[in-house]
Image (spheres, rainbow, N blue to C red):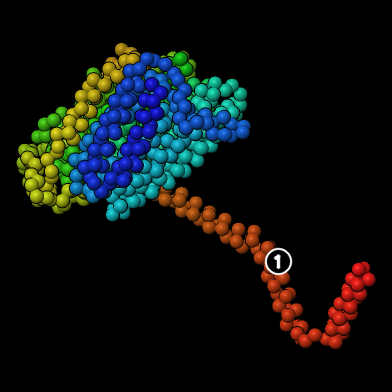
Amino acid sequence: MTWVVRLIVLLPALAGLAGLLARRQRAVAAGVAVGSAALVTALGLAQWLAPLRTADIDSLGGLPLRDLSVPLHLLSDRLSGLVSFVVALVVLAIQVFTVWYLREDRRYGQFSATVSLFAAGMLLVVQSADLALTLVGWEIMGWCSWLLIGHDTDRYAARRAAYKAFIVTRVADIGMVVGLVALAVRAGSTDLLDVLTATEGDGLLTVGLVGVLIGVAGKSGLFPFHDWLPDAMEGPTPASALIHAATMVAAGSYVVTRFFSLYAVDDAARLLLAVLAAVTMVYAAVLAFAQSDVKRLLAYSTLSQIAIMLGALAAAPAESGAAPAISHLIGHAFFKALLFLGVGWLAVLVGGTALVRMRGRLRTRGALRWSMALGFAALAGVPPLIGFFTKETVIDTAFEGVAEGVGLGAWIVLVALLVTVVLTAAYCTRAWLLLDHVDGPLEDTARREASAAPVPVSAGESPPAPTAGHEVAAGQAAGHGHHAPITLSAAVSVVALAVLTVVGTLFLTGLRGAIHVGIATAVLSVLLIAGAALAVWVASRHGRVDAAERLPVSVRAGAERGFGADAAYARFGSGVVGLARVVVMLDRDVVDAYPRATAVTARGLGRFGERAHRAIPSLALVGLVVGAGLVVGLGVVTWL
């Protein structure tokens, strides 16, 4: 089994390198990307189904540091096997879909290679039993996210979003580095098992856990680091699916899961986790409801769902473990990848992701329609889909935390969860009504849209250029561009994710504590979901108008801008630049002034002496020099 674990990390990294070398040969690049993803999926399945055991596995050999043990081990257990399998499975679906989606993109080879490298980074985090390896995988994902978000380098919005994501997550990663160093110093080792079993240094423990939490907040988009994630929608839809579904933003939940036993005994760090998770899950759900672009709606939804995972870790009793968070991570990977790829499929048909452009366009889409329906239902937590079981497990865990006296954090998380259940059902219902319902016959709506002013293309999407042999979609309005019929393999990727959204709960049955649903909490959640859906149905006049139009115009406009978070980032950046300029001025004009003044003074005195001297040797000076020479000569002769 040791070679399986090593290959799970090594193969996608090698595939990324091979894909870059073959980037100009599209067929070869696609074969490498899809083939390696399929092989890693099979290896992940083998690791998951292997007998349950925990084993430290050598990777490159330890680093020779005097006072710190750095063994660079990998970890093989049932948890890492399950998560690796799910990550590889989602990456496989995305790679297959991308072959069709970027069919006319000349930089497809670079994109698919970056996806492979991104997967390698995530799988290294999952398989790591060493803090140093965890940090390496963590940073690989950060670099790859910058490349994927900014894939369309010709667009300013994409470049800006990529730099924004890179800078925000890099700033947060300062906390991650400090936290991991503190935990390693406390244990005298970077080995995960040593870190978890160290018993001294409570001060360093709090510093380490808070630092790790800051890094997680940056990568997972917790408040106040959240605003980079919606802007990341400027990247192609497969990149959005990759970042939001099973990698990067979910990596933070996995890292905190590995440190759960430490968070369970540190009240300060755990309370901070609870507050950040609660604020993010409610705040992001409110923003999701008011979005006019479906990709940004799903982005804010991701923020809220990631916060639910972390909320489970903040509220769970120590004996319950971290399984509820992992179960929601896996469920979210399936239905969020499904929704993003489904939106990408529909966007190619209609030429954008703005809800006004997509309105009513799912009605005649067959498999895509019911796949999207399953995705939104799972996101809302409708039984018996996987989202219902995983979300109810988190809610039931929070109730247990309150009952067993976990502390204030459990209460905060529980209240936020119940509010988020209502808000999630509301924005899912609104999105579905807009995508599947129209006011009047679909043909009339298409005709009105065709005669209306052009709608700007939305985040990360551009209507594909017409090419020979492309067909016009049934029901597609004239003027919306042409599209290539979706390939069978790409369609199967979406349908397979839809099936996993229905049956994926079976994957969790072998993970102890991953599924436990209380009858009372389940009934309460179903009532809240039904009530929210009914309220949106009524507010939308039975699907004829947008329910978000009931909100004040100022609220909707503010939500579209993220309530000024981007402007706050810009002001903070300007403040940092201004402070840096002051520091440079002080360093140049104050600190360096004294050495420069000494040099200037010496130079001035030298020039003054040079000008005062006549440059003509006097007779006395000549005599002095000749006399000194004679004395030296006589001394040497006498000595000899």
* Camera-nearest residue between 87 and 438: 87
In this rendering, the answer to whether 538 lies above or below 261 is below
Q: x and y percent of residue 576 in the render? A: 49, 51
Taking the image as shown, residue 210 lies to the left or right of residue 201, namely left
* Camera-nearest residue between 557 and 63: 63
Residue 411 in sight here: no
Q: x and y percent of residue 457 in the render? A: 21, 49
Element under disc 1:
helix
The quadrant of the picture occupied by the N terminus is top left
What residue occupies the far front of the structure in this picture? 640
Residue 404 in sight here: yes
Q: Residue at x 54, y 34 (%)?
A: 63
* Camera-nearest residue between 176 and 446: 176
Taking the image as shown, residue 244 lies to the left or right of residue 320, namely left
Q: x and y percent of residue 528 in the render? A: 28, 22
Residue that mark 1 sits on: 598
- Residue 254 picture quarter: top left
Q: Residue at x 46, y 49 (%)?
A: 572
The quadrant of the picture occupied by the C terminus is bottom right
Q: Residue at x 12, y 40 (%)?
A: 485
**What amino acid does circle 1 point to?**
Thr
* Camera-nearest residue between 120 and 512: 120
What residue occupies the far right of the structure in this picture? 638
Q: x and y percent of residue 123 in the render? A: 38, 31
Q: Residue at x 35, y 51 (%)?
A: 160
